[in-house]
Amino acid sequence: MFWLQLLSNFIKVLRAGQTPRQIAGGFALGSLVGFSPILTLQGLLLWLIIFVLDVNLSAAFLAFTVFALIAYLLDPLFHELGYYLLVQVDGLRDFWTSLYNAPLAPLTRFNNTLVLGSLVGALLLSPFVYFAMKRFVTAYRTHLGARIEKWKVYQVVRNNKLVQWYQKIRSLGG
């Protein structure tokens, strides 16, 4: 039921609430966390940034979930990118060596090709995710929202007794 509530909150946010910039920012930051391994220093730092900035948390959690699943499909590409940056670019070898010898840097796990490649890949993709999500939120609020509410599938799900029962119980909780 957690995922259903997360999706429900996200749809509510799409309709009204925070600005498209805040929603897109949460989604882009969530995609960064989703592409990167969680138990690293940069992963924890990204979560801290999400909680400190005024971005939409539902969008961040949804993006984290979606992009964590997509990351498994892109792992071979991320590995190749990390391998290229760690091994094949001669100008970066001294940098990686000094970084690994720094006190906190091993917690980033940048010596792992997949960790480095996924972070660099996520950083390269995040501006596209941000602008695409910002455009989607704007389009949803102006055109798509009213069209989707007219769909038979939407009306059937919305008028479903189980969904109505769930919403009633959820509203009792506060």
Image: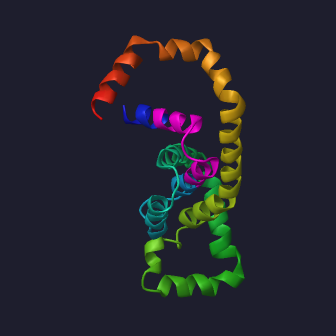
Picture residue at 55% right of the left edge, 14% below the top: 155
Image mark count: 0
Residue 173 falls left or right of residue 128: left
Farthest front residue in view: 17
**Could you say which quadrant of the image residue 83 lies in?**
bottom right
Q: Position of residue 11 (x, y in %)?
A: 53, 34
Residue occupying the far left of the picture: 173
Q: Is residue 50 left or right of residue 121?
A: left
- Relative to 141, does residue 80 appear above or below in the rendering? below
Q: Where in the figure is residue 29, as x and y percent of width and height?
A: 56, 56
Q: Which residue occupies the foreground of this view, 93 or 68?
A: 68
Q: Position of residue 126 (x, y in %)?
A: 65, 56
* Residue 131 higher or lower than 53, as above or below: above
**Residue 42 in picture, x, y percent from top left:** 49, 68
Is 19 magenta? The answer is: yes
Pick the front one: 173 or 79: 173
Residue 135 magenta-highlighted: no
- Image quadrant for the N terminus? top left
Q: What's drawn in magenta, residue-wise? A: 8-28
